[in-house]
Amino acid sequence: MCPKKKSPEEILASLIQCPLSRRNLMKGAIGAGITLAGISCSDSGSSNEKDREEEADTYSDGDSDGDSDSDGDSDSDGDSDGNSDGDSDSDGDSDSDGYSDSDGDSDSDGDSDSDGDSDSDGDVDSDGDSDSDSDTETDTGEDNGKSKVYIVHNTDRQAGLTELMEMVDLSFAKDRKILIKPNFNSANPFPASTHDDTISGVVGALKDAGAGAITLGESSGPSGTQSVISNKGTLNLCTRLGITFEDFDNAERESFSFTGMKWPGGLEIPKKMRSDHAVVLLPCLKTHAWGVYTLSMKLGVGLVPRNRRDTDLHPYANLAGADKGLIAEINKGFKADLIVLDGIKGFKTGGPDEGAECSPGLLIAGNDRVAVDAVGLAVLKMNNAQGIGGRSIFDQDQIKRAVAIELDNARSPQDIELVGNDDNVIAEIRSTLDQG
């Protein structure tokens, strides 16, 4: 005689009597917030929490302290922390972006989304990633229609750059030649000029990403390129890093133009900027005596032939009346694959070669010049920079013209998504951006 067939409920009840089966069932149901035969499987604390921990220890996966991490393997410290990289933050509690927030407590609501990172409201957005503005993601793209700008709050440049480069997607660099454009307006030290350590950190990250040959290219300010790089020791730096230097004053050039362009007869810029090289911009955070401010778009001035800088861009006979929107038009001639803005310090008055300093302690990255410059302007405004407070960010000449000619993706503050390691900093920049 065949044994009586058990109902699903009876089978489930018998499985729960076996601790190993019970634990596996619980692991399958955990996060769904359901209950198996009166046993809570939610992440919130309950009267069965101690029982669950004891069972997990009894049936561990062989790590040193008997705690299993999320994929069933022991992570480096033996504890499961729910972060995608398997590491806990400094106080042992995971926060939403994998970093400890300012008060050392988790800034999420304790609910994990599908990739193991907690988002701000406990819900998962359509791509399975956190939908919080301050969650870190390894992507510099615009997969949600917004331009991402990554912001690291860290006054230690080397550590901050390492953290920043881990956030952004450097896949564009693999097997490609790279052209880096720094800010060498003068030989004066940072923040007047791009810091050598910033160049070194970015070059190292690009090489780690599989980049091919790397060139540092520049045409410096009034004192001349050769004088600037000699005083800065740039050639020695390039030798040490295994990269080459190109003086853009002597570069082969290529013309471009577009409908509505205000530069008479179009414009010639170094051909490498329009070639198959990936372009990386390394601006500083500064006010500017003529241009009002100098960020990523202003680096384009170093691409313009010297004679046209004086006659078309900033004629010294009429500096006040010069069209600063022409700066944005230079940028229409090339694509930026990565921008790393060093805002550990900046000029809040004067510039570009000297001025009163501010110390935001920020490193900023993205691939949208409008978005990065808008964030840079927000930081300058937060530091009471001279000359920019009377106009909204997207009404500043460079950005206004960039939006008009459809340079890159951002057209308004709402087109910018902020991602970073300090929620308070992100919130302040977000508020400043939105207020203009």
Image: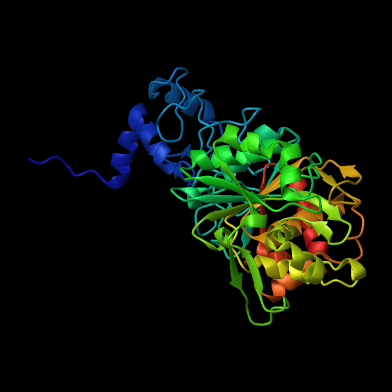
Task: Give the answer, above or below, for where 32 lies relative to 312.
Answer: above
In terms of depth relative to the viewer, which is nearer, 201 or 429?
Answer: 201
In terms of depth relative to the viewer, which is nearer, 90 or 332?
Answer: 332
Residue 7 point in image, percent of width and height: 26, 46
Q: Residue furthest top?
A: 64
2 lies left or right of 312: left
Residue 386 point in image, percent of width and height: 92, 55
Task: Give the answer, above or below, for where 389 lies relative to 107.
Answer: below
Residue ID at (60%, 71%): 255
Task: Give the answer, above or below, for where 376 lies relative to 318.
Answer: above
Q: Quadrant of residue 22?
A: top left
Q: Residue furthest bottom?
A: 259
- Any part of residue 102 in sight: yes
Q: Quadrant of the C terminus?
A: bottom right
Q: How many marks?
A: 0
Task: Give the answer, above or below, for where 262 lies relative to 378.
Answer: below
Residue 372 point in image, percent of width and height: 70, 56
In terms of depth relative to the viewer, which is nearer, 85 or 401?
Answer: 401
Residue ID at (76%, 54%): 376
271 lies left or right of 431: left
Q: Quadrant of residue 23?
A: top left
Q: Quadrant of the N terminus?
A: top left
342 lies left or right of 348: left
Residue ID at (79%, 56%): 294
Residue 297 point in image, percent of width and height: 71, 60
- Any part of residue 95 in sight: no
What colour scheme does the image use? Answer: rainbow
